[in-house]
Amino acid sequence: MRRTYLGEFEEIVLLMVAILDGDAYGVTVSQEIEQHTGRQVTFGTVHNTLIRLEEKGFVTSLLGGSTAERGGRRKRLFKVTALGSRALQDIQQLRNELWQLLPPNTLKLGGS
Amino acid sequence: MHPSNHPHPPRWAQRLLAWFHPSETLEEVEGDLDELYAYWHRRAGKTQATLRYVLNVVSVLPPLVRRRSFKNEYSQPSSLRPDMIRNYLKIAFRNLLKNKVFSLVNLTGLVVGITACLMILQYVSFELSFDQFHTDIDRIYRVTNDRFQQGKLVQHGTITYPTIGKTMAKDYQEVDSYTTMVNGGTVKLRREKSISQDEQLFYVDDHFLTFFTFPLLAGDAKTALKAPNSMVLTESNAKRIFGVEPKDYARLIGQSLYVDLDTEPFRITGILKDIPATSHLQFKTLISYETLVRTWGDWVKTSWDGSDMWHYLKLKPGSDAAALEQKFPAFSDRYFQGDKVSGSVEKFYLQPLRKAHLYSDYEYEIGIVNNGKAVWTMLIIAAFILLIAWINYINLATARSLERAKEVGVRKVAGATSGQLIGQFLSESVLLNLFALVLAIILTVSLQPVLNEMVDKPLSLSLLTGQGYGGSAMALALVGVFALGLFLSGFYPAFALSAFQAIQVLKGSFKRSAKGIWVRKSLVVFQYTASVVLIIGTFIVFRQLEFMRKENLGFNMDQVLVVPGPALTLWDSTAIDRITSFKAEVKRYPAIQAAASSINLFGNRLSRTFNVKRVGSNQEKGVTISRMVIDLDFFDTYQIKLLAGRNFITTDSDPDGRKVKNAILNLSAVRLLGLPDAASALGQKIACYGRDWEIVGVVSDFHQQSLHYPIEPIVFQPFYANGGFYSFKIASTDPEKTIDQIEQKYREFFPGNTFSYSFMDEQFNRQYRHDQVFGKITTFFSFLAVLIASLGLFGLSSYTISQRAKEIGVRKVLGASVGSIVALLSKDFLKLVGIAIVIAAPIAWYAVSTWLDDFAYKIDLSWWIFVVAGVLAVGIALLTVSFQSIKAALMNPVKTLRSE
């Protein structure tokens, strides 16, 4: 089966959506990425990536109820789809397989 | 919330965001950014927060931001999905079935329109495709020749002097090649005992076969017609005479055939593929020009004043025919020196081969000609009929808008877009049109034999699919026109109907727009205008045909039987006696009232002699007079009145033609010679045909040809010949028996000849066959056009009236009479027809006067014809409308009113 290509940042965003488990929206995703990876990303990048992930069918979104703290504006909450979680698992599995293939000392020698 | 706890991002940045960020995601992004601002503000202070806020706002502005594609919550299938199309067709089909009368009216209109159009187009395509099979058609020109005497045009012909083609080819380097031909008339071919039918024969020079594209199946095109007494036959002719198969054609080369009475055999040197029906030159046999040199003498190659030759020139590629024509006046000066050489001033022109069939108004035409104007008129009629049929469709479809409006409203409320509604209505029109097309093609194919007989042409649908004018481009063009018409006729109703506002329609306050009514009314006016023009045209054509049939021709051709003379009997010193005694023998039968022999008959172009002078007059220049060769009984047989002097008597004729010197003139000739009246011509002498002739009598003028042509000045000469015609005035009772009697005597007197006969009036009226075909076709198609227009009016009126059913009910309840209601309902439609008549009259007047211009003698365009046509149109419209309006007026008002 041909998998849809998932970029590195896309993978991180998708993972974050999964981690946030139902509470994922632009703000939380940005904050989590900043906290966990230390990367300063613009909001636009996160916003665009979420839209792209949705177009690819890895996440779905729903406009949540309005909250007073945002001046009554609704949040768009993201959720990982079956296809998205499958893609994440596939990546994980592929990495594991590749790690298994690694000769025992290669990284130690080269990396130290 | 505490103000310090609730910091605000800069307003200008917020506004920037609101303006430029895509609206689909503005709400969530504004909220997210506000939240982030608050977060940054808490963590890093106001300055940092503002800075980051601005930076992040920029990151979600175009072009950096990604647009969220709009997704409807309900799926919106495309109008072109197979499911939708299937649905459209299903609904369309149901709608057609639901309104059976309308569908039928509509379908009938379309089928009739398309069928008529296909038929006419076949004819037009056939006529336009003449001579297209010649590979060099665009480079081939015919030399035409106008002759002037004293500044007056005396001949406008395609025949000219034998030297012209050759000399032009020699003098002008633009000329690539030329060919010269002579009309040999009809001949019979003999092989041993068997004799063929009359075959058209041309004498042609040896370039003919390579000049034109008439391919040889056997023989060599370059040399076949070089030697004297060479003959080339067409395939079907060869088959009939020799009974051979195509593979044996080569064996026929070198075989002998005899022509008429010639004792010298002709050698077959080639077999031609049959001449296409679309060739303006039609012949069965070709004989080499050199043969003519032997029999007619050297002049057929060298003469500058004897003329009976047709010349065609082929120009070199890229040569300009107009520029070459400019050089012809100098050519005339050089070779004809004014009128010194031939007796008239000669002007030469080049007529493109493309125009030889349809645009040739020349005398002494060798080819088949037709009237180009008539052909284009047909095309216009075809276009109009199709247009009227489509207009019907538009009219009926929009007339039903009230009913369909509710449907449109409900569909729109259910979420249909205009695109889908247009798709819906278009598919109805496509379905109906395609169905009509299929029926029309079936109808055309099954009516083909009738059509072909009517126009006397080998027409077929293949003329429209690549065999005819324009080749396959024609087929493509037709498909294009049909698709365009289908599209346009479907589009107007589709747009009009889909544009309804759902809310208005469903609220019930919907009224038909004034604009829609205006459009429909103008369409009806257009339809009726076209119909009235056609009605008037048909009237005029018929009146003219009638006029030509009834017009006093100056001679009486009723019950005159014409028998071709014995062409196979040799001429000798006893010939005149034999002819006279044959006539006398036949006249002994009581049924035969008169018998005459002549070389010429009515209806054919007479030969002319130029340079005729009255002996002793001070006329310097000669005049041109036509010639008719007749015997002493001719005027009696045709009841032509003698105005002065005497008829021919036996002693005027002589077996030795050189001794004949008495002649009779008609009144026109007397006047042309400058004499005041018939009596003054008696005893005068005229010089022509190389000697002086004494005028012994003068007869009244008569129409020697159809009324297309003016009456000509004629000199009558008392010669006899075996190849002419016998005319017998017979009693009307039992013509079969009389013909049998004549045949018996004919065989007795002229053994070995074939007997055939015709009636003079039929033969004469055959000159009008193109006019008659034109008349028949215009009548037929005018009828169709009126029929279609009436169908349209019928549909429209029944609809409008059904819409006003309640109004009629109320009126009746209030005491309106049936008559007043019918008048009320019919008035609207009659107004439209009235406008149509006003528009149509000048158009028709212009069209018919153009057509009548082709006749030298024609009817006057009197105003009452227009009135009659108008009354007829109003009558038809009234009849159409009143059927519905009377029905509506008679209806019980209870029925229409109780439903509310």
Image (tube, rainbow, N blue to C red):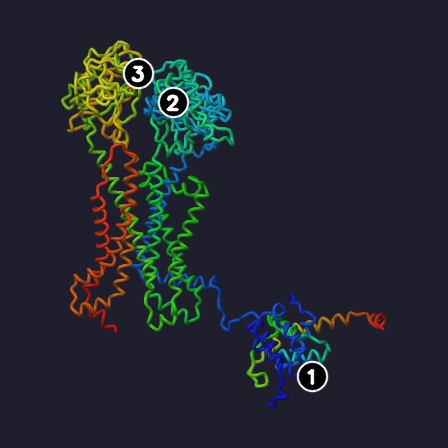
As measured in the structure, the alpha-carbon distance from the residue carrying label 2 to the one carrying label 1 is 111 Å
As measured in the structure, the alpha-carbon distance from the residue carrying label 3 to the one carrying label 1 is 126 Å
In the picture of the structure, the residue carrying the numbered disc 3 is B620
Residue B736 seen in this snapshot: no
- The amino acid pointed to by label 2 is Glu
As measured in the structure, the alpha-carbon distance from the residue carrying label 2 to the one carrying label 3 is 18 Å
Based on the displayed image, in which of its 4 quarters is residue B413 positioned? bottom left
Between label 2 and label 3, give the one nearer the viewer. 3
Circle 3 chain: B
Image quadrant containing the C terminus of chain B: bottom left
Q: Is residue B727 above or below residue B385?
A: above
Image quadrant containing the N terminus of chain B: bottom right
Q: Of label 3 and label 1, which has the lower sequence position?
A: 1
In the picture of the structure, the residue carrying the numbered disc 1 is B45
Numbered badge on residue B346:
2
At x 55% / y 73%, what residue is drawn?
B24
Which is more toward the observer, B733 or B162? B162
- The amino acid pointed to by label 3 is Glu
Numbered badge on residue B161:
none
